[in-house]
Structures are given as structure tokens and as C-alpha cells.
Amino acid sequence: MMELNLSRVDYVQVGVTSQKCMKLLHGSGKTQKIVIADHDGVLQCFGMKKGEPTHIFKTSPSQKINRLELGGPVGGTRDRIFIGVGPEVRGYSKKGKNFLSFDTNMSEPIQSMYVEGADLFCCGNFIYNHYRDCKDANYFLSGDQISDVICLPVNKTTDIIPVLACQDRVLRVIQESELMYEVEVPGPPVVLQLYGNDGGEEGNEILFGTSDGRIGLVESKLGGKLAPSHRWELTNDKRNGGVISLDNFDITLDGVKDLIVGRDDGLVEIYSYDEVEEPIHRFSHTCSESVTSVQGGSVGSTGYDEIVCATYAGWVLGLTTEPLTKGMGPTEVHIATTTTNKLHSLKEELDGLQQKVATEREKYQETAQSTSAISAVPYFAVNDKFVLNREDASYTLSLELQMPIDNVLLQSDVPIDLLDVEKNSAVVSYSACNPEEGNFLLATYRCQANTTRLELKIRSIEGQYGTLQAYITPRIQPKMCQVKQYQIKPLSLHQRTHVFDNSRPHNSLTLTGQFSLAEMHAWIVYCLPEIPERTPPGDNVVFHFVSTFLDTQLECCYKKGEAIFRSDNISTISILKDVLSKEATKKKIRLDISYEINDDSIPYTLNLLHPKLEHHLLLAKKVQLIDALKELQVHENNLDFMSPEYRQILDDANDLQLEYKKQPCHLERLYGMITDLYIDKFKFKGQNVKTRVPSLLEVLDNYDLQSLVQFFEASA
């Protein structure tokens, strides 16, 4: 198999781009043309000639373009360009002729789109519309936000079967205006792509990428013969960014198309299928910005394949198989002529731009000093994501700008921990803050020059809720700042799921009163993450959740005038009871509250906590011993007297310290949860046991599961 050695080549920079807004056109020439659309409303098509971009066409600026798709005859060449602008779809030929302007009359702007022959599929946030020859054909209202839409190839499946990727970790398969079935996937799916670009042999295989960085292949059911099945799934053990673009292209030249992945942390990856079904990682390249689109093809030079990428900030670049430098000896390197010419033209362009900037700066200074000066605040877009990670029960906050970030100030009115992020090169400094004034965190991240993306990790405490604010200051003049707010919810570490184990011992909370379904839904949205703002259709609503920290579960069933909550964790029920009664009081709605406590749920929850608690107690003890053992190692030449256990601690010292550093306050968190569990158990019995907490902490310091269970079972 060919050894992958790809070199980066920058082509052009356009405006800020959305996901799936760049494609390659298959033309009559030996190289392909790039077509790209941006937030400035500009659609442009260009090719490369002698290292320089040559434009085929470029439209005038208009409204922000959210999506670009290629269309053509079914099974034929896709050379017609379609863009989604607000609620309108515009079509262009490969020469730039505008042949279609179709107003879909959708109440939401088009966020995702797909074209299959004469069929057009458009989605807003919740609405799916299907048009045939620009006439309404089908309509579907999704229960949760739609991230992407794709249609199985009609020439292989005969039926029109669109698939929606939805935020509630579900792929919804539609037939006409009805939901055929749902396929649960391991994370919120963001992007869909046909396997091998044609859906496989039967046209029913779909690749998906999730916001928590997983990739998988599902095979959909056709003609009622097969149940939908998961073929394979790649986990995200290295905690890379969310997947936002996928493509299939044979870059390794082994006759099988490889999987190309673009992530929101700037990582571009290539996976190949080596006689196994599950793809194997072959290559990685890191850009400094989110990779919104990836496409395999040949653009820069005839005969050299490449991966073309578009980034959030609008850079279009290629990872090419063409060698850009040729070794001449141990000290000499010969640079290709095209590269030399490009470097020369870039230097000239840079000199011109520097001169222009100097002139404009002088002009601005003169205007600022005059009496009729008008100060304009420049606008900048922030691409931000606040995502819960199941693996370590933390939130990832990523902030991305088109220009370099100077600093980011974080302020929180609830206690939160900031965790280490390895790829984060920013310098953090903490300011003293007074919790009595509602300030629990003040931290400033100072970024290095040319940093356009910053990633932070945060862990919250359930039951303590409020707002996290990020003040983002870019390196532009005049100095300005933009504020972004993120809600830390009462049950912030819970994640949506579609399974619920009824065999567990459950505690239940029942609320009745004069509230509507919409009011109760608004309260649930306030309490829990990953729920759509819009009230779901129907008279009864059921949501299931799992705690990412403890693996306990929660069921919410509600309708007009009644809500029932079930959980194997008493603390979850206690938090919901407190928050919901407070929200109802604000609205002056009287609630009748009843609950049933199952004493068996306490040892069950403690058993769930046991492996984590044991692991972190052992880790803390080992880390405490490292310094003393290292001192012994310095003074003693022969370590034979040392037990194998201690020698192992010395061997693993770096890994142990790294793990401990990555999870600060983990043990304190577990202690806190056990303390809350103890207080909540007796609170429901009408007893206050806060005076017994020191005795509980003593039991935890000499931890033994049986002793802890006995302590809980002893009467207050």
C-alpha cells in the first residue's frame, strides 16, 4: 500500500464558511474546479493554473449562504450547483449561469439540503420539506433539531428514502411524509455521507459523524426485509474534535475508496479499509481552524491526487501527493518552480497590503483626532460550541474567530472546575473573586499570536446552576469585546438516551397542578441539557437521560397537569424537586408534590460509584508516594529491597501524575456526591443529618464499600 506523504498548499481565502459549502466539480479538463460559498453571500468557482487561482465565475455579495450541494441526472455527473440562501434555493451551471431561483416558502432559513435528480430536500432547524420539480411533495416536523439530510441513491433503491440526522442522537428515516423508523447512534449526529459516495452495493449504507467525535456506518432497512444495523463505529479515545465533514476518495491508490474526515478542532484524517470492514487510521494533518468541508480529487497539478479542505475562516487548501521539495543532498533542497513563483507573488502581495494598511491607519488616526470623528464598532462572528463529553463528564467550550484572538475572560456565578486541555497553548491566569458577590470563577486566557481557535474544558457540579460568560477580545483595532453566555443547568451532567432499565430500584417524584404541557416542557429545558426548546408534538412527552458521571438514569414523563420523574439516584430527584418547586413559585402555580423513596436504590447507587471511588483513592495514594519513592531512588543504588508494587509506581510515575493532573478535584467531587446522597436520603424522611457528615468523611477516608453501605443504613 502507498505510503502517505501529503504536503499542504494554500489556494485562496474567502469569507467565513458553513459546513458542506465547498465541492469539487468534475470538468472536461484533467484537473478539477473548486466551487465554494461563504457567509458574505458570494459563490465562486475557480481552478488552478501554474499555481495561481483562475476564476470561472464569482457572484456579487448577498445573504449568508448556509449550504452548497451539487446536482445532476440520477446516476450521472453532478455538475449543477445549488445553494441555500435564507428560505431560497438558487441553481447555477458550472459556467456560472443562474438557471434557478426557487422560494421554498419555509418559515425557517435552509440549514441543510440535498439534491437527487429532480428531487430537492430542504431542512430548517425542525422542518423537513421535499420538493419535486420545485413543487411541494412531502413535509415532516422533527421532534428535535435537524443537523443534516441525505437521500439514498434512487437508481439503487428505487424508492425515495431521505435520512435526517437529529440532535437527539437519532437518524430518522422518512418515506413520503411519514417516519419509517429511527436508528439510535452514539452521539448527536452532525454530518451524513453515502458510504463510498454511492451508498454501497445496495445503496443503503450511510456514514455519520457526531459532535463528540465518533464516526460510524449504518445500514438502513429496505423494503421491510432488514432491521437497520450498525456495521461499525470508531470511538473517539483521543478526545479529538467533533466530525463536521466526510468524504470518500481513493488517495492511497489501492482500488478502495478511503474515508476522509474533517473535524472542528482543525484535524484532517484519512482512514483506509485494509481487508477489514472497520477503517484503519492512516494519516493526520492539523489545521488551526475548523474544517467545514473535505473533498478528494485533483486540483493543483495533473496526475497528483489531493484532499481539498475549506476552513471556518475561509481558507481553501490542498493536502497534495505532489512533492513540493526535492532533496538534492544532505544540505541542499530544490524547490519546485511553481512554488518559487508563488512565493514571489505572495511576497509582492504582502508588501502591497502592508503599504495599504499603513495608509489606512494614518487616515484613521487623523479622523479619530478630528472633531467630527465617528467611531464604528467592527462586527465579528464567533463560531462557538458548548458540548457535553460522556467519557469524562465534562463540557468542551470551543471558540473560533476569523481573526486572531487576543484574550478570553471567563466569568461564572456557579462553582466550576477548569480542566487541562493539551492542545491549548493559551496562558491562563486566575483572579481572586468573592462568591458572596455571585462570582465563583474569573479566569483570563491570553492567546499566542495568530490563534484563531481556543478550546476549554469545564466540569460543573449538579444541583448548582447559573451562567458561564465568555468575554472574547480579538486582535483588532479599535479594541472591542463580544460576550457569549452558556447556561449551566441543574442536571448539567445528564445526557439524552433512548434506553431505560426498568429493573433498577427507582425513586419517583410526582407533580400535579395547573400547569400546561408547554410550561412543564420549559421547566424541563431549564433543568436538563440536550432538549429541544420547542415543545414536542402530542399530549404526552417522555425523555430518558443517563448521568455521564455516575451512570445513573432518569425518566421524565409529563403531560398537561401532571409530571412523573423516576431515577435510581435520590439526589437527582431531590434536585428536580427543589428547582421545579422554585420555578412554579415564580409563576405562582401551586404544585402538589408526592414522592416514593426506594431504600434499595442507595446501595445500588453506591455500587455504581464504587469502581470510580476505588480507582481515584488508589490513584491519589500512589501520587502521594511518588516524591518519597523518587528520593529513595536517588539515595539508593540498589532498589531490590523495594516491593514490586512500589517499583511499579516508580515506573508509571509520569502516567499517574498526568492522569491525576487531568482530573483535578475528582475525588472531592465523588465525596461531595456521596455526602449529597446521604443528606438527601434523610431529607426525604424529614431528618437533618448535616452534623453526621464529618463521621461520613471518616468512613470515606478509610474506604470500604460494605462499611459505607452500613453507615447509610444506620438510622440518623
Image (spheres, rainbow, N blue to C red):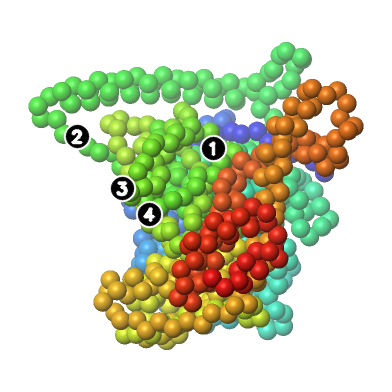
Q: Amino acid at mark 4?
A: Thr
Q: Which numbered disc covers residue 437? A: 3
The number of callouts visible is 4
Q: Which numbered disc covers residue 375? A: 2
Q: In 3D space, how far apart are the residues under numbered discs 3 and 4 (Cα atoms)?
A: 14 Å
Q: Residue at x 79, y 22 (%)?
A: 635
| Sequence order check, earlier mark of 2 and 4 | 2
Q: In 3D space, how far apart are the residues under numbered discs 2 and 4 (Cα atoms)?
A: 31 Å
Q: Amino acid at mark 3?
A: Glu
Vertical position of residue 103 compared to residue 67: above or below: below
| Sequence order check, earlier mark of 1 and 2 | 2
| Sequence order check, earlier mark of 4 and 1 | 1
Q: Residue at x 34, y 53 (%)?
A: 63
Q: Quadrant of the N terminus?
A: top right
In this figure, which residue is indicated by the disc labeled 4?
Answer: 467
Q: Residues within 10 Å of mark 1 (few under 14, many from 20)?
A: some
Looking at the image, residue 556 sits to the left or right of residue 237; the answer is left
Of labels 2 and 3, the one closer to you: 3
